[in-house]
Image (cartoon, rainbow, N blue to C red):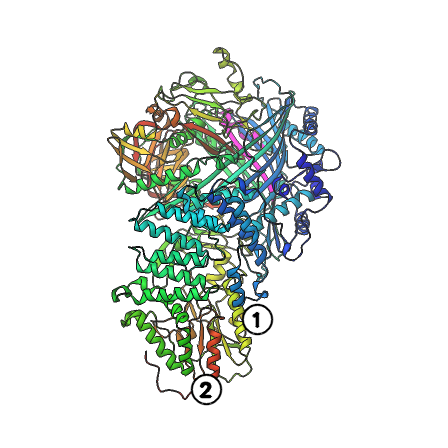
Amino acid sequence: MSGLGRFLRLDDSLRFLSREECAALVQRIRGLAQGGGETEVDITSWWSGELRWARNRVSLASDRRDIRVHVSRALPGVTGDGNVMTNQLDDISLTAAVREAERWAHRSKHFRTDIVTSVPDFQYAKPAIWSDTSYGLTTEERGRIARALVDPAEAAGMLSAGYIEVRAQGTASTPQEKPLMYAQQTTAQCSMTVRDPEGRGSGWAGGSSYDWTRIDPEALARRALEKCLASRNPVTIEPGRYTVILEPQAVHELVAWVVSDLNKRQAAEKEPGPLNAGYDTALRLGRSKLGLKVVDERVTISHDLMDPALGVIPFDDDGWGPYPVQAVTWIDHGVLTALSYGREYAVRMLTDNVPIAPRMAYRMSGGPTSVEEMIATTKRGLLVTRFSGVSPLSEGLFTGLTRDGVWLIESGKVSKAVKNLRFTDSPWFVLNSLEQLGEPVPVFSPDAPAIVPPLKARDFSFTSLIDAI
Amino acid sequence: MAAVAAAPRPLLVYFGRRPEPAPPIQDSRLKDLAAKALEAARGAGAGYADVRLTHDWSTGGGVAMAESLAAGVRALVNGYWGFASGPVWGSDEMARLGREAVHQARTNSLGNSRVVELAPAPAVRDGHWVMPVKIDPFEISPSEIQDFLLSLKIYAERFPGTSVQNVDARFLKQEEALASTEGTYCTQRVYGSSGDFSFNLVKGDKGLGRALDGLTPAGLGFERFRDAPLREAIRRLIAEMEEDLTLPEKPVDVGRYDAVLNARCTAGLLAATLGPATELDRALGYEANAGGTSYITAPFDMLGSYETGAPSLTVMANRSEPGGCATVQWDDDGVVPDEFTLVKDGVLVDFQTTRESAGWLKGYYAAHGRPFRSHGCAAAASAIDAPLERTPNLVMAPGSEAADFDDLVAGLTAGIAVKDMLVDVDFQHSSGSGRLYYEGSRMGSTYEVKRGKRVARIVGAGILFRAPEFWKSLLKVGGLASAQRHGFLDTKGEPPQNGCHSVTAPPAVFKQVTLIDPLRRA
Amino acid sequence: MRRLGMLLSALVLGPVTPAAQGQTLFATPDTLDVARYTTVEACLAATQRVKDSVENQREWIWRDTLAQTPARLAEDARTPLPAPVMAVARRCSARFAAGSAPLEDFAPLLSLFVAAGRDADAGALLARRLREVGPTADRERAAVLDTAIHVYLGNNQLPVGHFWPLPLFAQPARLAAAESLVTAFVHVNSVPWHARFDSYGALALAALSADTILASRAVRQMLAVARGLSDLERRSSAFQSRAWAINLGLMVDRKAALLDSLRHGTAAYVALWRELWGEVAGKDSAVLDGFARPIGRPAPPIAADWWFGRDDSTVGRPVKGKVNLVVFLNPGDFSCFEIDLSSLCNRTYAGLRRVAQRFPTLEITLVAQTYGFFDKAAPPPPDVEAVLLRRAWLTERHLPGTLAVTNRPFWRLPAPDRRRINRDVPNVTNYSFGRTWHVPNWIFPPFLIDQDGRIVETQFRSFDADLPEMIAILLARQATSPQSGDVRE
């Protein structure tokens, strides 16, 4: 019976495809190929339990699942650039998908040789990316949790909107001549926005992890409500340069862009930008700032997938064969010590088999100063909950908006809520203008886990006011 | 053999025990299948339920060809919605989905009460509609599409100094069957297409990069490439670029200027501000935890009185215009969308609604003698997703005089003219910035205008605006012939869903727009 | 609905595509109806697509098993476009008439007519276009002629720095027509010398395999352009960059005299070259540097860390008293492992094998070096990589001769950058003879060395052209007594 049979079961114990099922599916698909060559199959299957609320009432609760099977065929001597996708698992649909992939291979003129060296075999880590609790968080439990989150906001006369999701995914990929690579992972997230019914204030809090038990929904609800209440009736202030105290979520929204740059070694060597050090005419190659101090020496940005809070899928493959994801320290006490790159770069430029896998999960180092202490030592500054719409302008410069709570600090105390502002600044400047750092905590980042401290920085540039609350 | 290349690949459906190839959407057996889901939902206690079956085809986005089936059931129990979806069309699965949707709804219907009043909609009895396209892109050989795209590249490169950066086309086709416990059953087939054609022009040591304007998403088939005057558009664009290269470049001189914006910029600003701001669910806080809210902060109070713009601003909405990205015969509630007015002579007169959100306006409509009905804005990307309220096609009324972009520029004593803009707006869709800066490819141009003539290209500029004031500063609106339609993709919901709608707008003149240097720090 | 039904029954009954059998592995290209296409460019695109897919089908099998001899190349040059390609071009172009098509479509339509084999229409279109050019519009006339020359010569032309957006399908090249166009072109006022030079060069290259008489004529005319230049013109970069073309031209034009001088000795050969260079490039030493090849110089000994495929380890290479061919493999970072199977690399291997077979006493030394990785893996030690190189060159590609592999010296940028920076390989440095000449980075630069250990020649059109004749002459010649000192520059 085809794998599709799984989905006809009435119980919901099997909500996505297991390793064995993916392996069997790949076997079947390869068996359908005609004309020799290789067949690459990538399978993603997922289940998601979702609960959304607004205006203090659940607006939708869902149970959804789907599959994506991608097939591409490399025929002898020819590689097309078409991969074909189907979400059905029966023989006829898969046969048709394979034929379509063969027609696409035939249509393009991309050549390859038949000389294929064996990519070495690697050992792969087993990071913590699966949680039975997340997978087992029932509809009933989600409902109960949501009601407990909404009640306090409602009692306070505020309007709560939010979202809880638990998701399980099986990812399978089939590198040439290697056994199937498979990972199953869960992600869980919980976030909410509490707003004043007259629109005079708004607060937000959120958390995400692979493990639902690491999220404290009640604490999030309390924080969102507190911020909402404290942010009401904000006053206007002049745009300009301010000392800012950024909560971890706001820091993450800037530093994620830094991590994105840290993931691109070749771009850092070739393209103008904050990590580029120009072209060396003697050596005839582009240089990055590797080895140079690029930010404050208190900053270390790293990732260790075996950290229980920072697990990611332990393998990657960018077209040059699969390889393991390993720990990396990109910035070590302010010095740029590593930049991520793919396997082709590793083999050709560094004569290394294992590259530094790019990934968006990270940990940023912190310091001893709590947010309260930061406030107490600030003569005049702004406390920011988070940013929204952060987008790149040019070579390291970004713009974005504050959201869900900005407060003016005067003489060591939070004095008043202020209106939201647009900033034009660079995360690189921020990391070079640090005054104080606090304790790193997990932030809301469902796509890739991140542990980030709060920080205080000088001279942050707010360029205009915005109306939005 | 040609049939193999052209016909759709069959997927399987489990009507009974044995699977059979997925039939065209009008097959009556699909109605029976849908009925099983509704039966199960009713049996489990749903007050209302609907089911969607979709069969999707698409090309582009890293996938040469994708085809998928999906089924989703939505159930309403005591004012609470539940939803369940999956990739299988099968009898047993329909029953499972029906029961699961109710289970989801029930679990959240305990305790606090919630009221949903769905605006009435006549049941659709076995309706069927096909979006009229001339050429179904999935029925022709991909080689024909490939040849066409390459031919555009060869054509453009006959002009000295041009080099094509990117040329591609993407298509989608969806067949959907929708059934509800109110007796609605309808099937429809819709299409979408979009593309990109961008190239550089180098003359001496100066260069510019641009892209063809008319390839944004639309509800059209392959004819929008094959039968469109694209070669003419390429020639025109090259001529414009050559002219632009003769103009001197100037850095931005910050200040306030009267500004002529071309049709695409006007449409983009509408799509970023008034479009989302008039989604009733958004205005009431249903997207507060995601995209944000609306600057129409008191929807019920502001309806009928709030001035969203100058008296020359009238914005209508529809889901019926041929070629519109959001065009359908029935929305995902089973409602036939009507053409309605959102803004009349500058005043907010209505909101985008679904059956549920129209229910929130029941009192208002009654008090103003207007029919109590949904405007048909419910849409789900596919049956895997639950329907959401999405923006329909918007149409900004043109001015009464026949004036196009060049005429509006000619009428400007001093100011700026803008042909492309990247809009960035806040989470109430009010304050925003428009990036006009030129980075060597795809962006540009902003011009300095003196006595009706474009005299220089301004490099590195941006604008700042606040939607309410901005639309009130509308000075002049281009004529009917100058209006253009552009398609906009956007994302809404948790989890996020993609959607698309068209905006038709003419070029327009705005008074005293704030011009800034977006790269300047405070 | 019915069509769907037919399709479904086909699938249910059995597989649609035929079982794999040799060269019919893929379904034939789509036969959509190109007669519906309304633009010339769309027809060109369709023609290109069908040509690519026919080539895909034909060439995924190593071309080398079908011997790539000069005779075969000549035959290929004379073979028309594959029938399906011409058929598509013909069918699609049927709606375009030479007499009525808009002249702004001249360039693509000319290419399409040629692809379709509609030579008379091509000629008529060209004539019509030329008539439209005013009598004094020299630049326009030159441009039209230049376009037509390129179209008629198809893909068989020198890369002359043109950015050529059109696919070109003249196969075989329309040599006679091209020649008369070239004649007209060079007589248009205002055509600069390098354009004249290039048009003769393109004609010569296209004609080399198919019509040697025409080729010789074109070569002579090309050289005449070079000879007619002033010293100032010769100092330009336009001239310098054409030195290699001039050399090849001289090789073709003065072949008999050159081979004859070689029979008299390497010194005589070198002396004749110097004379020829003098005629063409003048006496300015700065200019002559661009022509200087290290012919006549003593060939430096080949050093290696590993030797493969040789019996006697005491014999130094190049081997004294024998005729030697030293071939550098991948002297730069250019890797010839990844190019497509029908490529220049594979044809070159075949040529080398033929030379080895024909001259069993020829001593062939292949010079290679390690890179620190092989294909998609980084092998730990260099000696392992050396063995992989041996396997790749000698075993898999059956290259003849002895393989000398150097453990390429390198250094690394300091941590954390750590990129490997390759140093020059001593063999490459030695055979580069200083700054005025360096081992070219292109495919397999070969050095032919006589029995006295002197470099005879380093530039050949291919391993099948000129080289075998020269080897035969060297073998027939007796080893002369060693001359004192280097042959003077």
- Element at label 1: loop
Chain containing the residue with disc 1: C
Mark 2, secondary structure of its residue: loop
Task: Say yes or no: labels 2 and 1 on the same chain.
Answer: yes
Q: Position of residue A378 (x, y in %)?
A: 33, 40
**Chain hosting mark 2:** C
Q: Considering the image in quadrants, where does the C terminus of chain B appear?
A: top left
Q: Is residue B18 above or below residue A363?
A: above
Which residue is more in the foreground, A261 or A95?
A95
On screen, residue B303 above or below A333: above
- Crowding at mark 1 (Cα within 10 Å: few <14, some 14-19, many 20+): some
Find out whether residue C427 is within the magenta segment: no
* Whether residue A335 can be seen here: no
User: In x, y percent, where is residue A270?
Assistant: 39, 54
Name the residue beneath numbered marker 1. Answer: C398
Q: Does residue B317 appear to the left or right of A74 in the view shown?
A: left
Query: Mark 2 = which residue?
Result: C478
Residue type highlighted by circle 2? Gln
Kind of residue indicated by mark 1: His
Q: Position of residue C186 (x, y in %)?
A: 33, 58
| Residue drawn at the location 42% of the way across and 43% of the way down | B198
Furthest-bottom residue in this view: C481
Q: Residues within 10 Å of mark 2 (few under 14, many from 20)?
A: some
Q: Is residue A179 left or right of residue A299?
A: right
Bounds of the magenta segment: A145-173
Q: Name the one closer to the observer, B349 or C242.
A: C242
Decide: marks 2, 1 in contact (CB < 8 A)? no
